[in-house]
Amino acid sequence: QVLVPLQSQMTATIPRLDGSALRDANGNHFFPDVILSTRCLEQVEVFRSKEKPKKVIFLGSDGRQYPFLCKAEKRGDLRKDSRLMEFAAMVNQLLAKSPDANRRNLAVRTFHVVIISEKCGLLEWVPNTKGLRHVIDDLWKTRKHARPSLPQIKDMFDRSKDPYETFTKQVLPRHPPVLHKWFLKCGDPSVWFAKRVLFSQSQAL
């Protein structure tokens, strides 16, 4: 039996008990919800980025599916991801002490990182999220004119005598801003404003 390495399961929760009850507490008090992995689903999604990370899904003992990102970096070190999450946890502790931050519900969304080796590990999949690149790609698919490919852009610079002029007069006009259209997908002004505030706070953090 293998424990599903969720952040909620890997973080001890101190129960609210009095002195005598706290001395008699066992592991179930600190880790109340134990979800074990029964198997790994056969379907694996491979992403198109450079290192070709894989999205694997574990089936928990509670019947729910828990996706993880299996990542291997030839020149990277996933221990940096783990340390970054520890730093983010410290930032959340500081934000929790600030009345202004609590009023704005400011917090860094963290996830658990399982270090298998220096170059390989598992990253907990954050639900209800979508990468900014995927959002931009979906918006570009709705445009009439397709954007130039990377080889085409490289060819522009290879033939260019002035890279700055090529970038400002050839590349930028073919890549107009499109992210603002994502905020306009919902016609409700309150939803638009909530998206705008959430995006601004996320970028600030």
Image (cartoon, rainbow, N blue to C red):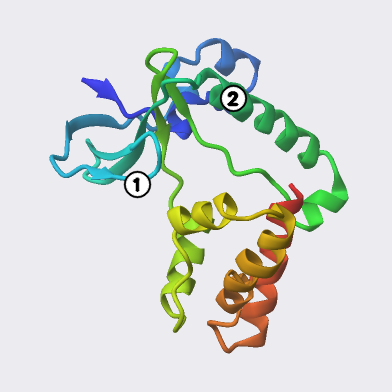
Q: Residue furthest top?
A: 23
Q: Position of residue 38 (x, y in %)?
A: 17, 31
Residue at the spot x=47%, y=34% of the render? 8
Q: Is residue 191 left or right of residue 104?
A: left
The disc, 1 or 2, on the residue closer to the chain's N-terminal end is 2
How many C-alpha atoms fall within 10 Å of the one at disc 2: few (<14), some, or many (≥20)? few
Give the labeled residue for mark 1. 48
Give the labeled residue for mark 2. 14
Determine whether 163 is above or below 91 in the image: below
Task: Give the quarter of the figure containing the N terminus.
Answer: top left
Q: Amino acid at mark 1?
A: Arg
Determine whether 65 is above or below 1 in the image: below
* Mark 2: secondary structure: loop
Q: Is residue 134 left or right of residue 184?
A: left
Give the total number of marks visible in the rendering: 2
Residue 128 visible in this rendered orientation of the protein: no
> In the depicted view, which residue is nearer to us: 51 or 68?
51
* Mark 1: secondary structure: loop
Residue at the spot x=61%, y=21% of the render? 83
Q: Position of residue 108 (x, y in %)?
A: 66, 43
Residue at the spot x=57%, y=22% of the render? 80
Alpha carbon of mark 1 to alpha carbon of mark 2: how far?
Answer: 41 Å
